[in-house]
Amino acid sequence: MSDTSLSLADATARVDPRHWRVVEGSLRTSFATGDFMGGLDFIAKVAEAAERAQHHPDIDLRYGRVHVALVSHDVGALTERDTALAAEISAIADELGIEGEPEMPRRITIGIDTLDAEAIRPFWRAALAYADVDGDLVDPEGIAPAVWFQSMEEPRAQRNRLHLDILVPVDAAEQRVAEVIEAGGTLLTDRFAPSWWVLADAEGNEACICTEMPPPTAD
């Protein structure tokens, strides 16, 4: 099975759209398992498939729901191993009568505006006990939000220095933006859509709704 990395379009085309979306570089889904024991039964069957494939997903068990994420960590991207195991997991879900909730997966990262990332990164790495991965700070356990540093040329007194990036499935982004606006948010810019939208609350605190799509090219 090829270890060649797959594009967003290729990975999306190879998996069941009832279940899977690409979010933050991984194939992700949520399955409504009904109760805790139903989730355990589902996970046991997924574990058997993973062992056969010698390729193992990240799994989060909650009451009535199981979250699954797939990525080829050794490649640092999605490969055929991920889409093949995703197909097996979809078949297990169908066998057990479990419905997928592909709009559920989401990831959050924290952006910090900075004049000098090198000067402040060690502070945040120590405070959070995170690992430095290519300049970003990540939770070694893969649980808590990652932190990244956005360079600026001069201080911006008119805005906060921290903001949240909420990564959602491509087909859920516009609805999420609409819901934020309906909840009192203000759209600051959509010039980078469908890659990201920048919104603010009533006090100017910012959040970006982000997807896997690249930003539009400049004319």
Image (tube, rainbow, N blue to C red):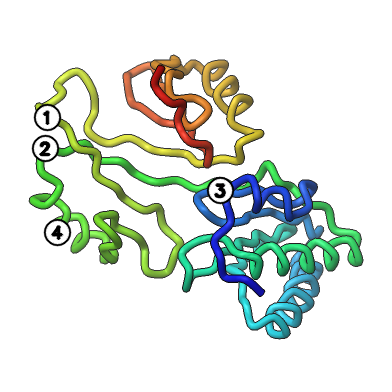
Q: Identify the residue shown where x is 19% and y is 63%.
A: 126
Q: CA distance from mark 2 to mark 3?
A: 29 Å
Q: Earlier in the sequence, mark 3 or mark 1?
A: 3
Q: Earlier in the sequence, mark 4 or mark 3?
A: 3
Q: Identify the residue shown where x is 89% and y is 65%.
A: 96
Is 85 placed left or right of 59 in the picture?
right
Q: CA distance from mark 1 to mark 4?
A: 20 Å
Q: Which residue is mark 1?
A: 153
Query: What is the quadrant of the C terminus in the image?
Result: top left
Q: Identify the residue shown where x is 56% and y is 40%.
A: 168
Q: Quick one: label 4, few (<14), some, or many (20+) residues within 10 Å?
A: some
User: 75 or 134, which lies in front?
Assistant: 75
- Residue 122 is marked as 4
Comparing marks 4 and 3, which lies closer to the viewer? 3
Is 202 placed left or right of 122 in the picture?
right
Answer whether labels 2 and 1 touch (C-beta < 8 Å). Answer: yes
Q: Indicate the secondary structure of the residue bearing disc 3.
A: strand
Answer whether labels 4 and 3 touch (C-beta < 8 Å). Answer: no
Q: Which residue is mark 2?
A: 115
Q: CA distance from mark 3 to mark 1?
A: 30 Å
**Residue 92 higher or lower than 22, as above or below:** below
Q: How many marks?
A: 4
- Residue 23 is marked as 3
Q: Earlier in the sequence, mark 2 or mark 4?
A: 2
Q: CA distance from mark 2 to mark 4?
A: 15 Å
Q: Earlier in the sequence, mark 1 or mark 4?
A: 4
| Type of amino acid at the residue the image marks with label 4 | Pro
